[in-house]
Amino acid sequence: MYSKVDFKEQNGIENVSKVFIGSDHGGFESKEMLKRYLEVIGYKVEDVGTFSKDAVDYPDYALKVARNVARNENVMGIMIDGAGIGSSMVCNKVRGIRAALCYDIVTVKNSRLHNNANVLTLGGPLHEPEELCEMAKIWLETRFEGGRHWPRINKMMAVERGNR
């Protein structure tokens, strides 16, 4: 179903060393499928849970993804819950995180090109497996444009520091 590609080619400029992935029970099946896909195409993936379909609270796992991304360099995070909304809210409470809830290829690309998102949140049950794979792959491959977007990113991060 998936073909293996060269890791350096896949990750290119940013050299993503690891992807932290998590979910709640509503996103568990999507997470398991996406984790396998990302490993096949060459990413090192660390699963922070949940590890079953038993009911859990999404904030616990969103926090694990966000904290791991915030304290490591060259890593990205993906969090999957029922709609992606709550996880995005939780992740964005962690200093240094720019989590983006995306729902199609346009928002996936924009979140990286213009906003330099470092966590992607998805509503697993809202998408077909192939769509989730395509969205995650494009998100991980898309590079921040920099340039005119830097001042906006700096303003966003200044809000986090309480300087705006």
Image (cartoon, rainbow, N blue to C red):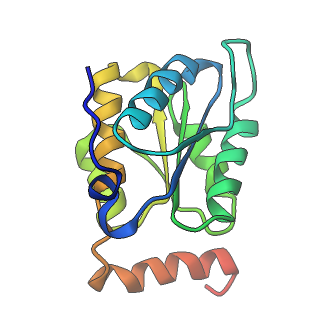
Q: Nearer the viewer, residue 120 or 133?
A: 133
Quadrant location of the C terminus in the rendered image: bottom right
Image-based side of 69 in relation to 154, left or right: right
**Spot occupied by residue 156 in the image (x, y as percentages of width and height):** 52, 75
Is residue 129 positioned above or below 59 on the image?
above
Q: Quadrant of residue 55?
A: top right
58 to the left or right of 115: right
On the image, the x and y values in percent for residue 105 come to 24, 43
- Which residue: 38% across, 43% down? 42
- Residue in front for this viewpoint, 52 or 160: 52
Count the marks: how many?
A: 0
Q: Quadrant of residue 1?
A: top left
* Residue at image point 30% right, 63% down: 12
Residue 48 position, x and y percent, is 68, 37
Q: Which residue, as the protein is rendered here, is positioned at the far top?
A: 54
Residue 153 vertical placement versus 108 (above, below): below
Looking at the image, which residue is at 28% across and 24% down? 130
| Residue 36 on image: x %, y % | 45, 27
- The residue under the point 65% across, 63% down is 70
